[in-house]
Structures are given as C-alpha cells and as structure tokens.
Image (spheres, grey):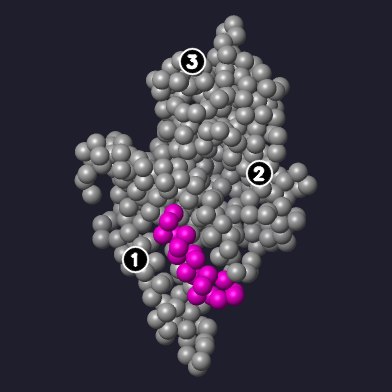
Amino acid sequence: MSSIAFDLPEEIVAVRDAVTAFVKREVLPRHERHAALLDSPLRRYGHDGRYADEVYALIREVRMASSEAGFFNMCVPTAIGGGGLGHLAYFVAWQAVYHTCGARNFLAPYTIGHWAFAASAVLEHVSEEVRTRILPDLLSGRRSMCFGLSEPGAGSDASMIRTRAVADGDGWLLSGRKLWTSNSPHADYCIVFAVTDAQAAAAHRGGISAFLIPTDAPGFKLESVVRLFGHAGGDEGALVLDNIRVERAQLVGELHQGFGTALLGVSLGRVYNAARAVGLGRFAIELALTYVQQREAFGHPIAEYQGITFPLAESAMQLHGAHLMGLNAATLLDRGQRAIKELSMAKCYAVEVSLEAVNRAMQAHGGMGLTNEVGLAEIWQTLRIINIADGTNEILKRTILQRMLKGDVEL
C-alpha cells in the first residue's frame, strides 16, 4: 500500500518497477559474483587511486546492459536519441534504485545515465559532428564523460571560474584547472566550462562557454585522484588543462552562454541527489526497523524501548516529507516551471534529514552499525558528500531566502 495519496502516472510506475527488476536481475547478482573484488578497497582501486580495470569493466557492463534494456537513456531528450521521460521519472527511478540497493552495491547507479557521466539534456545542443561521432558511444554506455565546472577557487560560486579559452583562428586555446570532477579518472570526454569573454563574465552577463573535450587530447591531464574519508581511491579528479586546442564543433550550446548549460546540469544534479538521499534514508531506516525487532536487551526486543524507536519514527516523518517535496519539485519542472525555490528546498531538506536518519539507524544498531558488513557507514559517507555536492545546504538556503524576498512566498 502506498503512503502517497495521489497516483503517479502509469508509465512512470511501470518504469520504476522495471528498473527495480533490472537491478535485482542484472546488478545485484554481479555484486554477489564479484564480492571479493568489489567489497575490498585494496582490490577495488589501483595504485593510482582509480578503479581497477576489472571493476571499471563491470561498470561498463552494467551501463551497456541497461542501455540495451532501455533504461540507461530513458530520461535523455528524444532529440538526441533518448526516451524523453522527464524529471518526475528521473526522481522516481533514482529513488527506487537507491532504496533497493543502498550504497554498498555501487554498480546499481550505473543503471540510469547520470547527467554528468552520460548523455543528458546537457548535450541537447551539440554540433552535428558530436551527435554523429560521440553521442552513439555515450548512449550505448560504451564510453562516458564528466562535467568540468568546479575549480580550486570556484566551488559554490561557479561564476568565479578562471579557466580561459582564448580565440585562436577558427577555434580556441584552453587552459586552466578543474577540481572535484566526478568520473574524470575514467571518462572519455569532459565538458569544460571556460571564460570566453572576460568582461562579460566579470559583469555576470554571460561570457562563459562550454566545450566537449576528449580526455586524451594533448594538454588534458588527470593530475590526481581525490581520495575521501581515508579511502584507497576515489572517483573524483583534479584536472590540469594546458593550452588545449578546441575546435568550433566542440562548442556545447551557444558561445558565451555556457553558464545556462552549467545551471541545467546542476539542476538535474539536485533532482538526482534529492532522490538519492530519500532512497538511501529509506534503506537505512528499514534496516534499523528490522534490527530492533530482532535484537534483545534486558529480556526485551529493543523495539520496545522508546529511546531507540522514537528517533526512527521522527526520521520516518521527515523522509516522508522529503519524498513528497522531491515529487512536487520534479512535477513542477515537468510542467515547465523553473521551481528554483522548490528544488532547492527538496535537495537541501532531503540530504539533511537523510543524513540524520542514517545516524539514527547506526545508533539503533549499536556497534554493528559501524561495521562494513551492515553498510550504514558507507551510506553516511555518501550522504555527507551530497550535503555539499550540486550546491551546499547553505547556498540552497540562501537561494530559497532570495526567492522569498523577491516575492516568491508560496509554500
């Protein structure tokens, strides 16, 4: 029985259920068969911090199997070969994936084409050359990309980017640095955002352009893999871009208007992260509810102790609210509304309450909640990251307040 009073469109329910079935049929068994490789940090990563070749081969397998099954590109615009489903389908499907799999089964998110790693609305306005030569491999899952926006001095305030593309004949010479670029250790292409009109960029009137660059281009270098939480490796990269030759066919969208492309990507990221947070939070609370009914202390199941269970009930209330907020924001976006305030609320609230839900689930498990076997620590780390990714909670609250001060006070 659903706790949501209104019915989701039948086609979205069908997609959600089909994606969940695909994950259970194709992804989770791969984790079981390759547990010795995937569950061991020492085997998962190579000496340079990147995924081991065997691990990345499994990631590519999942992408390609999902593409063949019709899920990988289901929310990609039809104009570039996708299924054309909207934000609501994107939210619902991602939420289902993470609710089903948690964080340990890290192959599961490759079931759906992530906006920064694969084809998405971000690439809707690329040149004919890119459509012909590059898009087919991205759509098939054979190759992947990354999104080079953040820099050492430009994180939440993306307008501070210092990477420059200087006109040179019919193209540009591009130089700069990028940081926190997810998937860059393995990506075949990178969308790089660079200043092309310094005066306009300084005045916040455009002046930033986006370019799709092969990661094996002369001058493109993965300087290091960024490791988090003491891990042996990671999927974030620090990039050095040294005088890379960029041709006009590599321009994504309009010249000097790349910031709109960046904002589109970040908005998709907020839908994704809101869904991811709700799914992971639900996974954690359900795990805790099972545990507290089985574990006994002082002659009683610990589910009978309100000090243990009331916090779980509070998180359940909060996650229900976060779920509804995400569905609402995605629906508004599909109706053509900008929903700046609502999407900011949905992402900010979801990641905050989900992090607390995992914290409470860990506490309910006692010492077991800290173990690798249960997997809650990995969920906590993931949620701690997405409290920062695609707009920190502080930036999102600032956005919400700015919208309300301008008269957008509907709640």
The magenta region covers 351-369
Most extreme residue toward the top is 169
Return the x and y of residue 217 as percentages of the image width and height.
68, 23
Compared to residue 220, the image places residue 286 above or below, namely: below
Which quadrant of the figure has residue 371? bottom right
Query: In 3D space, how far apart are the residues under numbered discs 3 and 1 (Cα atoms)?
Result: 49 Å
Most extreme residue toward the bottom is 299
Return the x and y of residue 92 as percentages of the image width and height.
40, 52
Return the x and y of residue 264 as percentages of the image width and height.
42, 33
Dominant SS of magenta comes to helix
**Residue beneath the point at 57% across and 17% down:** 165
Q: Is 100 in the magenta?
A: no
Given contact means CB atoms under 8 Å apart, are the residues at marks 2 and 1 in contact?
no
**Residue beneath the point at 56% across and 38% down:** 117
Query: In 3D space, how far apart are the residues under numbered discs 3 and 2 (Cα atoms)?
Result: 30 Å
* Residue of label 1: 317
- In primary-sequence order, the first of circles 3 and 2 is 3
- In primary-sequence order, the first of circles 2 and 1 is 2
At mark 1, the secondary structure is: helix
Compared to residue 335, the image places residue 290 above or below, namely: below
Return the x and y of residue 196 as percentages of the image width and height.
51, 17
Q: Amino acid at mark 2?
A: Val
- In primary-sequence order, the first of circles 3 and 1 is 3
Q: Amino acid at mark 3?
A: Asp
* Residue of label 2: 226
* Residue of label 3: 197
Compared to residue 345, the image places residue 102 above or below, namely: below
At mark 2, the secondary structure is: strand
User: In terms of depth relative to the viewer, which is nearer, 230 or 285?
Assistant: 230
For disc 1, the neighbor class at 10 Å (few under 14, some 14 to 19, many from 20) is few
Q: Is 368 in the magenta?
A: yes
Q: Amino acid at mark 1?
A: Met
